[in-house]
Amino acid sequence: MNINAAEVVLYGSAGTARTIRHLVETGHGHRGASVVRAFIDDFKGGDGQVLDGVPLITFEQYAERLLPIPVCITLGDPRLRQMLAERVAAAGGCFVTYVPDATPKRLMVGDGSYLSNLAYVDGNSAIGRQVHVMSMAHVGHDTVIEDFVTLCPMVCISGYVVVREGAFLGAGAVVVPGKPGRPIVIGRGAYVFAGAVITKSVADGAKVAGNPAAPLRELIKRERGRR
C-alpha cells in the first residue's frame, strides 16, 4: 500500500478524475502532493491524446510504461471499480491510498481507497479496499465500510452502521444510527438514491429511495395510494 505517493496514474478521465487530480496535485488536505503522470481511458486513450496537459493513455500503454507507478481508480461505480482494480492487480500494478491529514491514526483504511480531505470519518470506524468517500461525507463512530463502496458527496452515516461490499450511496443520503450489536446494514451491492433517508437495514442488491427509504416498487405503490 502506498500512502499519498509522489506520482500517481488516475484510471478514468471523467469529472471525478479531474477533481481528484486537482486535490492530489495541490496536496489539498493530504500528506504531500502527487504528480499525475497520466489518465487511463480504455476508449479515448492513446495516439498522443492529452487531457488538461496530462497524457491520456490506454491500459496497455500503462502496463508497458508506467506499471511501477501506483494507480488511483476514479470511477464511482463500485462494480466497475472492482473490475478495474482486478485488472491492474493482474498486470502487476499497485494502488495509492489517499488519507487526509486530519484522519485519526487509529482508523483502518484499506488499499486503494480515496478519502476526500473535506470528508469526516470517525477513528472508531473501518474503511475497506477501494472505497470512495467524497467531499462533505460524514462517517460516524463504530461504522464498517466494506470494499468497493462509494459514498457520494454529503452522505451522512451515523454510528453503528455496516455498509456491505459494492454498495453505492448517492449524494445527500442519510443513514440513521443503529445500536450496539444491532447495526443498520446496507446490503451488498445495494443502491441508495440521492437524498434517501435510511431508517432500517437494506437488503442485498436492493435499490431504495425516498424518506423513509423504501424499494422503488413500494414507493410507486405509496404514491399511487396518495392519489
Image (spheres, rainbow, N blue to C red):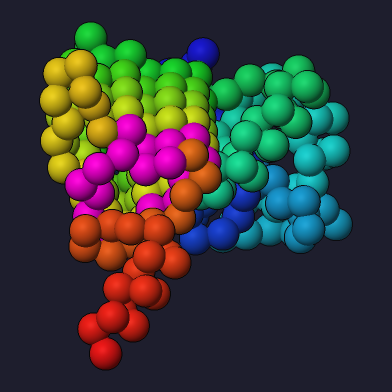
Is residue 106 among what the camera can see? yes
The front one of 198 and 44 is 198
Q: Residue at x 37, y 49 (%)?
A: 169
- In the rendered structure, the answer to whether residue 104 lies left or right of residue 31 reads left
**Quadrant position of residue 114:** top left
The front one of 212 and 40 is 212
Q: Residue at x 60, y 55 (%)?
A: 13
Please state the horizontal and vertical placement of residue 61, each as a whole percent of the image: 82, 39
Q: Furthest-top residue in view?
A: 106
- The majority secondary structure of the magenta stretch comes to loop
**Quadrant position of residue 226:** bottom left
Check if residue 196 falls in the magenta segment. Answer: yes
Q: Furthest-bottom residue in view?
A: 227
Is residue 156 among what the camera can see? no
Q: Vertically, is 112 above or below 82?
A: above
Magenta highlight range: 185-203
